[in-house]
């Protein structure tokens, strides 16, 4: 028996075939070629799947997929920011071609489900995942099941943390994402440099090209660069406000923080975030919640996709 | 068959005995006598139950209870703000005396469960309830089941809506409750009057005694009093921010708004709240959620307690 996990990203598609014990049988990676249109993208997807089937002697029993964007319960991708999917019946199409059960979910939801299966244990059933990357996403797992509400649940990046606050890409004001995403960090640094502040980040920004790498930010932080310290403190501040609010709302067993920004800054950012969350969680509540950094990096999505199709069978 | 719903409040205890179809058989009401200590309170509770049993010929099959404060999964009241319950095994005690299944839950959770059973239908399975009274409370019903997390879930009053914002009774800064509760409204009006503003509320406040009635606020609002309009707009503003955030987090089927403040101001406050929420919910999301004012007033608690014990049997 084999189950296939697939992570369709904006730039690459990663597929891993797992055996019944969750051991990797084979993996395949291809470029998404999102700019070349939907037919080319689907061709790449099928090639990844076909190649994985060829590499295995065990029968394919199901396919799990994570994809950026809004996905409905039927596995139709309503909208994707990076791939030309629009009301696209992705699940139906894959099911038709391979005649196996298919699960399609949002990439952050799927990846956080994977992290939970990797990190969590049987006592952590109510789990929140916050993903801090270019934007801020989230996932809600309740009693061990991914909770989606009517489909879009878990948009932690668009919780308001500051009325009358910064404008967000979504058009609203004061969203967490407008303060604590990679985009927000970049914007804040550029603004401060524009004001004429002296910082190691000016040079690092030039070295990195247009967008500062999280690793560069950490480098400047470790050299006690005032602006680097300030921007990390600011990020942690707003993350902590959101984490505290979410603890008051959900009182979960486990809270996983992940994504590029969180993974690069690791325990430095986590510790500062929890210090701030302590100020906002109801008295005594925070210490009842376990916190963890994500651990799987780029493989969380494909592993979560595998775990989700497994859970559906 | 009879099931008993009990609402133990800070000032009164209301009990209603229901038949198997949810029809009221009998009701009893007594003062809580919270100031006279725990034994007196429990004596009052037992009298309400005993009297209800006497009035009925059908066998008592279970008792549901709502109580202000923090209640754990075993029905132990860890803490109550109004009644001298402290790590008090309320469920165990009632169960021992009457030898029937007992459910004890937090009053806001229980009341909102009652409102959902009253208002909702089979298509509304994921439901949020926000209760705007002296403080702001909440309840989360997911797939038709009251969600409690580790016990304290649903503390919507302690979501941060404004970083660096007003201080809240909980000790934190910027909580919704510090902006949109009866207490916050009173505080804001007193501050504005203290600044020398002319308003109809000055006189109404004197008539009402120490605390302004919500009905007085509405009266001044209808007479176009500038401060009354301002304070209602301000309340709606912060409620809307929280409602928008919660829609982004849960994408629920139904959102019930209730409590004394909301019930008194009804559609005026609801409409303004939803206008603000529209600014913060993700594009297109708000219109997929049904909104309703609570409808049961003081009877929501006892009805919810009945429905909860029914659901457990």
Image (cartoon, coloured by chain):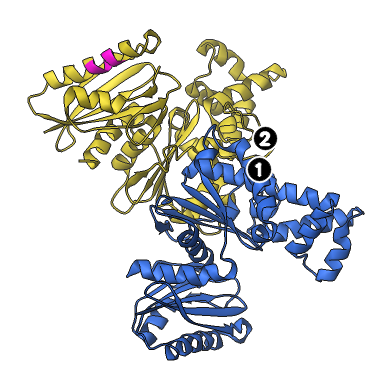
Chain colours: A yellow, B blue
Label 2 close to label 1 by CB (< 8 Å): yes
- Whole-percent x, y for residue A72 in the image: 38, 34
Q: For this view, does B172 lie left or right of residue B41?
A: right
Chain holding disc 1: B
The residue positioned 54% from the left and 39% from the top of the image is B286
Residue A172 seen from this side? yes
Mark 1 element type = loop
The residue positioned 29% from the left and 40% from the top of the image is A118
Magenta highlight: main SS: helix
Front disc: 2 or 1: 2
Q: Quadrant of the C terminus of chain A?
A: top left
Mark 2 element type = loop
* Image-quadrant location for residue B100: bottom left
Q: Which residue is mark 2?
A: A165
The image shows residue A153, relative to residue A192, as above or below, that is below
- Whole-percent x, y for residue B237 in the image: 69, 45
The image shows residue B125, relative to residue A50, as above or below, that is below
Numbered range of the magenta stretch: A42-46
Q: For this view, does A121 lie left or right of residue B105?
A: left
Q: Which residue is mark 1?
A: B163
The image shows residue A177, relative to residue A204, as above or below, that is below
Q: Nearer the viewer, residue A290 or B18?
A: B18
Query: What's the distance in space between the residues labelled 2 and 1, CA to CA?
Result: 9 Å
Q: Residues within 10 Å of mark 2 (few under 14, many from 20)?
A: some
Q: Is residue A54 magenta?
A: no
Q: Nearer the viewer, residue A148 or B123?
A: B123
Q: Quadrant of the N terminus of chain A?
A: top left
Q: For this view, does A244 lie left or right of residue B270?
A: left
């Amino acid at each position: 028996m084999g189950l296939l996990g697939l992570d369709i990203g904006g730039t690459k598609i990663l597929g891993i075939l797992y055996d019944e014990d969750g051991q990797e049988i084979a993996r395949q990676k291809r470029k998404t070629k999102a700019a070349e249109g939907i037919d080319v993208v689907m061709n790449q997807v099928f090639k990844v799947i076909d190649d994985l089937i060829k590499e295995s002697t065990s029968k394919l029993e199901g396919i799990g997929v994570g994809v950026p964007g809004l996905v409905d319960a039927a596995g139709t991708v309503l909208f994707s920011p990076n791939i030309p999917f629009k009301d696209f019946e992705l699940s139906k199409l894959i099911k038709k071609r391979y005649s196996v059960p298919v699960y399609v979910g949002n990439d952050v939801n799927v990846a956080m489900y994977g992290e939970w299966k990797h990190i969590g244990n049987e006592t952590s059933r109510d789990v929140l995942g916050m993903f801090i990357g270019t934007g801020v996403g989230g996932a809600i797992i309740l009693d061990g099941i991914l909770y989606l509400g009517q489909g879009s649940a878990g948009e932690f990046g668009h919780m308001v943390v500051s009325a009358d606050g910064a404008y967000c890409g979504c058009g609203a004001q004061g969203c967490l994402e407008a303060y604590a995403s990679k985009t927000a960090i970049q914007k804040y640094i550029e603004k401060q440099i524009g004001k004429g502040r002296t910082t190691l980040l000016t040079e690092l920004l030039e070295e990195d090209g247009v967008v500062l790498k999280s690793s560069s930010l950490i480098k400047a932080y470790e050299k006690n660069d005032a602006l680097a310290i300030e921007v990390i403190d600011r990020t942690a501040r707003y993350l902590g406000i959101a984490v505290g609010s979410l603890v008051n709302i959900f009182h979960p067993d486990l809270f996983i923080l992940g994504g590029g920004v969180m993974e690069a800054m690791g325990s430095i950012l986590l510790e500062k975030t929890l210090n701030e969350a302590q100020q906002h969680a109801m008295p005594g509540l925070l210490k009842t919640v376990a916190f963890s950094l994500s651990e799987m990096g780029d493989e969380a999505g494909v592993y979560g996709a595998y775990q989700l199709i497994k859970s559906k069978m």
